[in-house]
Amino acid sequence: MTSSEDILKKIKEKDVRFVRLQFVDIQGIVKNVAIPVSQIEKAMGQGISFDGSSVEGFVRIEESDMVLKPDLNTFQLLPWGHNSGSIARMICDVQQPGGESFQGDPRYVLRRAIEDAATMGFEMNTGPELEFFLFEKKEGRATTIPHDNAGYFDFGPVDLAENIRREIVIALEGMGFEIEASHHEVASGQHEIDFKYGDALTTADNVLTFKYVTRTIANNMGLHATFMPKPLFGENGSGMHVNISLFKDGKNAFYDQYNEHGINGISGISDTLKYFIGGVLKHINAITAVTNPTVNSYKRLVPGYEAPVYISWSGANRSSLIRIPAARGSSTRVELRSPDPSCNPYLAFAAILTAGLDGIRNQIDPGEPVSDNIYEMDAEERKDRNIRSLPGTLRDALNELEQDEIIINALGSHVLNDFLRLGRAEWDAYRVQVHDWEIQRYINIM
């Protein structure tokens, strides 16, 4: 644990002049207030006040006074500075003026889910895999022209982003990340950098930092990095597969070394893992509104392009929505493949965890795993095997969320109401637009 004394010492050693106090709104957009180091002791003590009415989904103007309270464990030097000194950042919890947690703070929503898990003796670890695109800029504005034409696992000179990924990795490692892999993805201009799993709150913080650092370094190199789920028609979209494990008393609760014959033919897994999957699958339609929160998310969640749209689970089968990678022991985990990097990671992890705990509490059976390639099945075969599909639009997902009491309770009424309001406003704005596809298809024939 980091103390205020540790931070003051680092500030002096590294000649820090400004500290950025960061937080996120309901949509997962990073916000920040920069303070000079002369105010850091006040920030760590009583917090820094700000106007919450100007942040989407927070509070009304008549109750606008809010407080940013830095989490001391998130203090990090930013990998870029200024001639006049270094800059640091701290991620904050949002509080009411009296010191109570703010119900609309996404970080608080995840903290509450983590506390619920703790009552059952569980701690959730997550390891997200974020994909992103690097696009060229023209006259300072982002285009959809890929930075290169390389493919999966290609390398230089075809992969033009080797140096860029290396700079991102170096910057992240300087901020405490343990990077596991970096490579070119399937689509032109598409990339992935994987970092080590951690507890859910730390990992959610890391997702935001990862996106922030990646976009900043790309911009400094004259490119635009985007975590948009589906920026190019006809190309693979960008996902954020989430690897999940539960630990209890220091041991992986998803692993059962004595279960040689396995569960549903899958060896080495516990009933806890099976029921966790059962809970997630039961609530997955509502979860999808949280893990895939934009209109564009559903351009990725379509059959083909390796998109996981069929509600099922399996061992190593990558056509299933949830799979269990081969590693066992402390590495036993489930991989939920539908989330995308446009989501708010705090809300996404809270929804997934709450659904999984519901499965454990109520011993929800996920049904039989699917070992066959679901992508090759026709509609009739999927129907015979009771393999349903995820919601096909943001509107459908939001309607599912509104009817799921477990996920509603996970988010809390404040977040839920604003999440639904913002999501439906986005759907309505999209629905009434006239798109280029319509013009090209209809203008000359009607």
Image: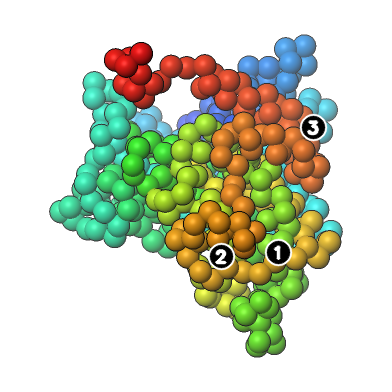
Q: Is residue 30 left or right of residue 105?
A: left
In this rendering, which labeled residue sits more in front, label 2 or label 1?
A: 1
Q: Which residue is mark 1?
A: 366
Query: Which quarter of the rendering shows the C terminus?
Result: top left
Amino acid type at image mark 3: Ser
Q: Residue furthest left?
A: 157
Tell me if residue 353 can be seen: no
- Image quadrant where residue 413 sits: top right
- Image quadrant where residue 22 sits: top right
**300 in relation to 325, above or below:** above
Amino acid type at image mark 1: Pro
Identify the residue at image location x=46%, y=38%: 299
Identify the residue at image location x=68%, y=37%: 106
Q: Which residue is mark 3?
A: 413
Looking at the image, is mark 3 or mark 2 earlier in the sequence? 2
- Image quadrant where residue 83 sits: top left
For label 2, the SS is strand
**27 in relation to 168, above or below:** above
Give the crowd class for mark 3: few <14, some 14-19, many >=20 residues within 10 Å. Answer: few
Depth check: 364 or 392 in front? Answer: 392
Depth check: 412 or 217 in front? Answer: 412
Give the crowd class for mark 1: few <14, some 14-19, many >=20 residues within 10 Å. Answer: some
What is the distance, in whole Å, between disc 3 and disc 1 at their CAs?
28 Å
Q: Position of residue 232 (x, y in %)?
A: 34, 37
